[in-house]
Amino acid sequence: MGAERLNEGEPLQHVLGESWFDGLRIKVNRSVLIPRPETEEVVGALYERIQPGEDSNLLVVDWCTGSGCVALALKQRFPKSEVLGWDLSEEAIEVAQINARNCNLDVTFEVHDALDAPRLVRPADAVVSNPPYIPRSEASSMHPRVTQHEPDMALFVPDDDPLLFYRALEAWCASGNLRPGGWIGLECHTRLASEVAQMLVEH
């Protein structure tokens, strides 16, 4: 049965029902993106910038959390911190909550829209996100294993507004939801990364 599903183009991680991310076993299905190794770099980059012992009372928000892999990896690395994982998809949040229980990590996962984000009670120390960033026109050049088995809403943005989520997250952080001197860690489209960086520098 598994071999047939693989022959039909289904991702191995879906056949197995799980993937690995930063040493954590993560449940995956069609409601969430399959964790990629390059996303681990966001976790590693933040870990390099926060010194051991500085995670006490740290507040980290993971936008577009999906399976919760980034939020859970950060909680594992910063066990004294408070970590929030938010996503618009109720199905994704359900998967993330299962992963939190399976990994025995205390992360709060909730349904929120990054384009209409609630204000935090206190400013975050770090905001991380792997938001949708692939222009819709690029779908035809992508492997069917991705486009036919992973959620569109986690992948694609309008061709005429590829920085949609980055602008929203920057504005949310700038409106008092990220403390002065806090960190923003974002995964970006290779072609658009310099534009995202320039936007953050300007603001």
Image (cartoon, rainbow, N blue to C red):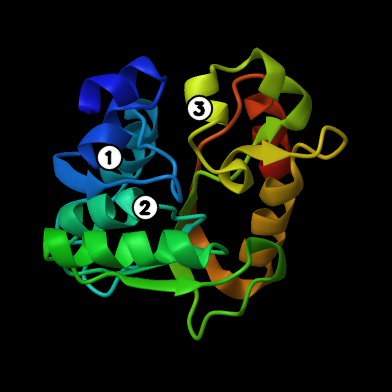
Q: Amino acid at mark 2?
A: Ser
Q: Residues within 10 Å of mark 3 (few under 14, many from 20)?
A: some
Q: Which residue is mark 3?
A: 146
Q: Amino acid at mark 1?
A: Glu
- The answer to whether 101 appears left or right of 187 in the picture is left
Say which of marks 2 and 3 sits in front.
Answer: 3
User: Which is nearer the N-term, disc 1 or disc 2?
Assistant: 1
Q: Residue at x 14, y 61 (%)?
A: 102
Q: What is the secondary structure assignment of the residue under circle 3?
A: helix
Q: Is residue 195 left or right of residue 51?
A: right
Residue 162 visible here: yes
In the rendering, which numbered label is found on residue 48?
1
Closer to us: 131 or 185: 131
| Residue located farthest toward the right when viewing the structure as drawn | 160
Label disc, if present, on residue 67 of the rendered structure: 2
| Nearest to N terminus: mark 2 or mark 3 | 2
Kind of residue indicated by mark 3: Val
Disc 1 or 3, which lies upstream in sequence? Answer: 1
Residue 68 picture quarter = bottom left
From the image, state whether disc 1 or disc 2 is nearer to you: 2
